[in-house]
């Protein structure tokens, strides 16, 4: 993101001003939350309400139809009983407002929404038991099923052909591969892209289409303690990567990010897959491509994080969160090979089925 499309950096007084003017609320506490390229803030008001103020970066703020769809998708999931945030109307009854303000990069327009606050901690902070991973897979599948039934006049904006984070666009990573020059991982990434082209693309016509959340990761899933000393999912966050894709993409993304948080990453896939298949059993083509798609997401995360750090060194710590552990896991998955990894995953699914 260039300075022209910079991440918003609203000051404390600017946030207070927006809360009062747009939402008739007086903040008693404002706290920054992590974000890749937007500004997310926890806001408590003096009347006891808790909210998330989401300020989109200036580039994404231009795409009103896309933000409208994302906002609508959140409410559809919420209406269907999934723990999704919803946008709250401002003083003039609108769910989103384009605000022109100078927060350090000259006057820019930023889309502002106030979202409901969901209690819980990110799934990255709790032990990933087989049961919680199962529930994660099940939730991801239910979410995509509901999104696929969604009706909206602007659905076509989700056909994001050039969207770099879409698992349909893995070959476009080749444009940035020089960022890994001299790194031993360069060969692994090139090899995964080659496998994607030769083994995934020819089978893609057999994948089932759907609308993807696209970023079902360890910082976008909230959990709370349940009655049995475990955890249940209490929140699904961040719909900024929604795109038209395939069910198998969502599953691969969920597996990849849960692996980055687990002491034995290889064991993660089976539990997530078992949960997913309790809702949506995979067909033969999807099953055959899962391994390469998981590796492809690791490659996206690695290459695009390195690229973002080159552009924004000041944000390096957040940008490299998934990428650091991912390097080791990617290498390990690659060295184990498709057959060995699939065997571990599919045996684990069979064991889950026996228990249920």
Image (cartoon, helix red, strand yellow):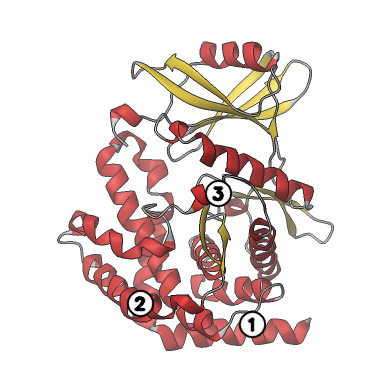
Residue drawn at x 30%, y 56% is 303
Residue drawn at x 52%, y 13% is 14
Q: Secondary structure at mark 3?
A: loop
| Extreme residue in the front direction | 153
Q: Secondary structure at mark 1?
A: helix
10 Å neighbourhood of mark 3: few (<14), some, or many (≥20)?
many
Instruction: Report the residue marked by disc 2.
Output: 334
10 Å neighbourhood of mark 2: few (<14), some, or many (≥20)?
some
Instruction: Report the residue marked by disc 3.
Output: 219
Pointers 3 and 1 in contact (C-beta within 8 Å): no
Instruction: Report the residue marked by disc 1.
Output: 349
Image side of residue 323 versus residue 149, left or right: left
Image side of residue 47 versus residue 69, left or right: right
Q: Is residue 127 above or below residue 5?
A: below
Pointers 2 and 3 in contact (C-beta within 8 Å): no
Q: Is residue 64 above or below residue 78?
A: above
Distance (Cα) linking label 3 and label 1: 25 Å
Q: Say which quarter of the image contains residue 148.
A: bottom right
Q: Give how far across and how far down residue 35 sits, in percent.
A: 48, 38
Q: Give how far across and how far down residue 155 sits, in percent.
A: 57, 50
State the mark number for residue 311: none
Quadrant position of the C terminus in the picture:
bottom right
């Amino acid at each position: 993101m260039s300075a022209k499309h910079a991440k918003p950096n609203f000051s404390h007084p600017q946030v207070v001003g927006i809360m009062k003017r747009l939402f008739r609320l007086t903040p008693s506490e404002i706290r920054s939350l992590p974000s890749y390229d937007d500004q997310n803030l926890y806001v408590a008001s003096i009347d006891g309400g808790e909210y998330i103020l989401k300020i989109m970066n200036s580039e994404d703020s231009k795409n009103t139809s896309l933000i409208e769809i994302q906002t609508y998708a959140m409410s559809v999931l919420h209406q269907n009983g999934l723990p999704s945030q919803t946008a709250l109307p401002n003083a003039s009854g609108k769910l989103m407002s384009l605000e022109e303000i100078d927060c350090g990069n000259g006057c820019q327009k930023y889309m502002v929404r106030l979202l409901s606050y969901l209690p819980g901690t990110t799934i990255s902070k709790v032990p990933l038991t087989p049961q919680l991973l199962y529930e994660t897979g099940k939730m991801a599948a239910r979410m995509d099923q509901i999104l696929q039934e969604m009706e909206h006049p602007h659905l076509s904006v989700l056909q994001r052909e050039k969207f770099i984070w879409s698992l349909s666009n893995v070959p476009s990573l080749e444009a940035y591969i020089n960022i890994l020059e001299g790194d031993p991982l360069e060969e692994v990434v090139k090899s995964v892209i080659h496998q994607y082209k030769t083994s995934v693309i020819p089978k893609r016509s057999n994948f089932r289409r759907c609308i993807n959340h696209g970023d079902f990761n360890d910082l976008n899933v909230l959990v709370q303690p349940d009655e049995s000393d475990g955890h249940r999912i209490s929140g699904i966050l961040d719909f900024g990567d929604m795109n038209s894709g395939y069910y198998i993409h969502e599953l691969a993304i969920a597996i990849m990010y849960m692996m980055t948080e687990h002491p034995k990453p290889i064991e993660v896939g089976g539990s997530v897959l078992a949960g997913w298949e309790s809702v949506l059993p995979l067909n033969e083509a999807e099953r055959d491509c899962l391994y390469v798609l998981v590796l492809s997401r690791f490659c996206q995360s690695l290459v695009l994080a390195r690229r973002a750090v080159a552009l924004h060194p000041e944000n390096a710590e957040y940008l490299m969160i998934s990428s650091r552990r991912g390097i080791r896991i990617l290498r390990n998955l690659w060295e184990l090979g498709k057959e060995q990894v699939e065997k571990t995953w599919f045996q684990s699914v069979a064991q889950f089925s026996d228990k249920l």
